Amino acid sequence: MNPRVVTVAEREANHNHPIFLQRFVQAVDHYVVVFDLLEATLPPNSRERLAVKQVWLGREIADIVVTEVDNQIEQHERFRSWKVRLRSSGFNIPYLGGSTSPR
């Protein structure tokens, strides 16, 4: 493969800390925003909202908070980690504007 463009869609959160308290605080900070957005976009008693909370977010939060880092399914990392990984693989990361700068 020789891609011209690669898009990475990743949460801007670090849920990989080996110390439980740090992982928990990071998760709370992240998921407070996620649940606020969910509340703002879906009616309180909608099936979709309930499904997102129980099926997707519930499992994800349990995985991040309860599971030891080495056994986690979810491995959210901040943009700076992705930037290093992508650059070390030969990718050029142009600045496209917005709040997350690759500089």
Image: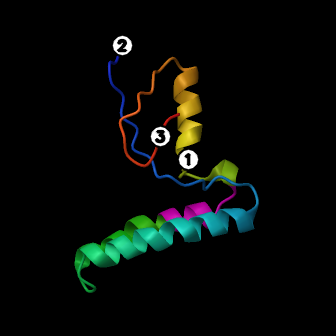
Q: Is residue 50 left or right of residue 31?
A: left
Task: Give the image quarter of residue 29.
Answer: bottom right
For label 1, the residue is 78
| Residue 1 x, y percent position in the rendering | 36, 14
Q: Earlier in the sequence, mark 3 or mark 2?
A: 2
| Residue 7 x, y percent position in the rendering | 36, 34
**Callout in the foreground (3, 2):** 3
Give the residues in magenta. 60-68
Element under disc 1:
loop
Is the residue 29 above or below the residue 6 in the image?
A: below
Nearer-the-camera pick, 16 or 102: 102
Pointers 3 and 1 in contact (C-beta within 8 Å): no
Which residue corresponds to the image point at 57% horizontal and 40% vertical from the top-left? 80
| Residue 95 x, y percent position in the rendering | 41, 32
Estimate how packed mark 1 is, as few (under 14), some (14 to 19) or many (20 or more) residues with alpha carbons within 10 Å.
Answer: few
**Amino acid type assigned to the residue bearing label 1 in the image:** Arg
Q: Is residue 89 magenta?
A: no
For label 3, the residue is 101
For label 2, the residue is 2
Is the residue 37 above or below the residue 86 in the image?
A: below
Q: Main secondary structure of the magenta part?
A: helix
Element under disc 2:
loop
Which residue corresponds to the image point at 54% horizontal and 55% vertical from the top-left? 13
Nearer-the-camera pick, 5 or 74: 5
**Amino acid type assigned to the residue bearing label 3 in the image:** Ser
